[in-house]
Image (cartoon, rainbow, N blue to C red):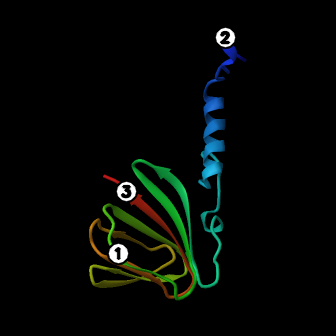
Amino acid sequence: MVLAEGVPMSNGPADTDRQQTVNSKAKGEIVPAEADRVVELASYQEGSVVSRVLIRRSTGNVTLFAFDEGQELSEHTAPFDAFVHVLEGKAEIVIAGKWFQLGAGEVILMPANRPHALRAISRFKMLLIMIRS
């Protein structure tokens, strides 16, 4: 359907959903209202840390990481809280000098403005949920 002067007319929610799907796929994000196995959305690469932003919003991001054994993110700070959910494997996480060892199914909140670092004890995957507030 076309309005005057060649401007396409929206078919309502279906057009909005279709456009959101196209936009999400183009940015490498997950597609709304479609099921996925999160651990399959990023692959391990030898000697590397792989990351994929699954959701990017002004209020926060959800990023999937795949760490090869021994790989790490050096100590740094972030201006927002970051929620870590380990999906598989094992990791060491240091927050403000305190050490934690997390395995599949475990979570930890890394508070804003506190130094933290991560290291893969074995290959591991995690979701990092950054909350901007």
- Mark positioned earlier in the residue sequence (1 or 2): 2
- Amino acid under label 2? Ala
Of residues 25 and 129, which is closer to you in this image?
Answer: 25
Q: CA distance from mark 3 to mark 1?
A: 17 Å
- Nearer the camera: disc 3 or disc 2: 2
Residue 79, image x and y in percent?
30, 62
Q: Secondary structure at mark 3?
A: strand
> Are the residues at dot 3 and dot 2 in contact (C-beta closer than 8 Å)?
no
Q: Which residue is mark 2?
A: 4
- Mark positioned earlier in the residue sequence (3 or 1): 1
Q: Which numbered tag is attached to residue 76?
A: 1
Residue 86, image x and y in percent?
49, 73
Residue 120, image x and y in percent?
50, 84
Q: CA distance from mark 3 to mark 2?
A: 43 Å
- Amino acid under label 3? Ile
Q: Residue at x 32, y 61 (%)?
A: 80
Graded by Cα atoms within 10 Å as few (under 14), some (14 to 19) or many (20 or more), the crowding at tag 1 reads few
- Horizontal side of residue 18 vs 66, given as left or right: right
Of residues 47 and 18, which is closer to you in this image?
Answer: 47
Q: CA distance from mark 1 to mark 2?
A: 55 Å
Graded by Cα atoms within 10 Å as few (under 14), some (14 to 19) or many (20 or more), the crowding at tag 3 reads some
- Amino acid under label 1? His
Q: How many marks?
A: 3
- Mark positioned earlier in the residue sequence (3 or 2): 2
Q: Is residue 72 placed above or below 133 in the rendered structure?
A: below
